[in-house]
Amino acid sequence: MEYHVKSLDLAEKGRLRIEWAAMSMPVLKKIKERFERERPLEGIVLGACLHVTTETAALVQTLKAGGAKVFLCASNPLSTQDDVAASLVKHDEIPVFAIKGEDNDTYYDHLRAVLDAKPTITMDDGADLVSTLHKERPDVLDSVIGGTEETTTGVIRLKAMAEDGVLKYPIIAVNDANTKHLFDNRYGTGQSTLDGIIRATNRLIAGSIFVVCGYGWCGRGVAMRAKGLGARVIVTEVDPLKALEAVMDGFDVMPLAEASEIGDFFCTVTGDIHVIRKEHFLRMKDGAIVANSGHFNVELDLEGLETVTKKRRTIRDYVEEYLLENERRIYVLGEGRLVNLAAAEGHPSSVMDMSFANQALAAEYMVGKGKALEKKVYGVPEEIDKEIARLKLESMGIRIDSLTEEQEKYLSSWEMGT
């Protein structure tokens, strides 16, 4: 078996951490048990480009239990947990190509190693695997039934491909499932982002001014958690509806040019490029801490920052100090990459339980329906979304009501008014 991980000596530590995460993933456990009985993915080669974490390990174990032959690479150079990668290779015999801190060339070599397996289903987190497949490996396209995509950033890229008529197979936007973005993006990103910032800096959040750039579901989560830790939160936005919602949620809203002068912490979660730019860095006060929790590191204009920097040094793990030409110091966390995975462990397993349940069931759906679908981006079928929510509530010991026949009739009719 070909693989490329840091060291198989880390495998036992990884196995125990995977076991710990799986304890909080009851929905995925139920799916795995059914997959072991029914083997719905038998004969499928599944190429996965995901953050190689303990939660991802539980997912790929589930996919393998369903009969798939899984090949896994990292979707971000800094998101791999090396002990998890080693455990998947040694204990689960899953080919993994991922090393934390890998350079850009190695990152793309790992993507190509997965594509060499000629996957019939792709599972992506950011659309780099799909993009590379379309650009470099057209010979593989004929064998692909369909794929899934985990992130907002990836869905945006794939919809652009579909709009331009270059997407060659159907993709299910797992990110758009209610049981994904309402929970993973909000509660997962909120908690894990603050976790990454605190681990990297050991700075107090309470009493600080915390600037959140973007008020999508991830931004909502980060703002909520920063406020919960005692920060005064400022939101910056370009969408008037989201800005209005942030105001109604109790946050200050202002242009980034103004916020950059007063913020202590900055975190981008927009999915767009160059949100914090050179002019913003120059306005920041001495000691400002800047992080990104969007999928790619492009949200921070680090090249622009370099042009106004006199000296740069690593002052602690995942913290780089930039001494600017105005003699102020700016601290960038995790090289501008996903701070929750670069400096911490990513989302808690209990919330990834639902996201990865969506991935597993979407892969199963593609096996049955993929060949009949058009070459575009689809949402997760409503029945899958609701089933995952039902299983999650069941695992929490929570019961809900059912509609009476009278109520169902009322909701489906138009005759009855006041």
Image: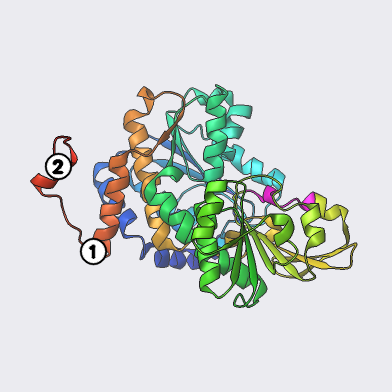
Q: Quadrant of residue 30?
A: bottom left
Toward the front, the furthest residue is: 418
- Please report the bounds of the magenta region as a residue range: 296-303
Q: Report helix, strand or loop for mark 2.
A: helix
Quadrant assignment, res 226? bottom right
Alpha carbons under labels 2 and 1: distance apart = 27 Å
- Say which residue label 1 marks: 398
> Any mark on residue 23, and which?
none
Is residue 304 among the parts visible in the rendering?
A: yes
Residue 130 pos. (x, y %): 55, 34
Question: Residue 295, how many percent across, how many down?
Answer: 59, 49
The quadrant where residue 231 appears: bottom right
Which three-letter amino acid code belongs to the residue tagged 1? Ile
Report the residue at 65% width, 41% height from top.
109
240 on left or right of 60: right
Determine which residue is flagged by label 2.
410
Foreground of the two, 130 or 93: 130
Q: Amino acid at mark 2?
A: Tyr
* Residue 322 counted in the magenta span: no
The number of numbered discs placed on residues in the rendered structure image is 2
Colouring: rainbow
Q: Is residue 72 above or below residue 341?
A: above
Q: Position of residue 342 (x, y in %)?
A: 62, 60
Quadrant showing the C terminus:
top left
- Crowding around mark 2 (Cα neighbors within 10 Å: few <14, some 14 to 19, many 20+) is few
Task: Say whether residue 73 is visible.
Answer: no
Magenta span: helix, strand or loop, mainly? Answer: helix
Side of 408 relative to 186 (left or right)? left
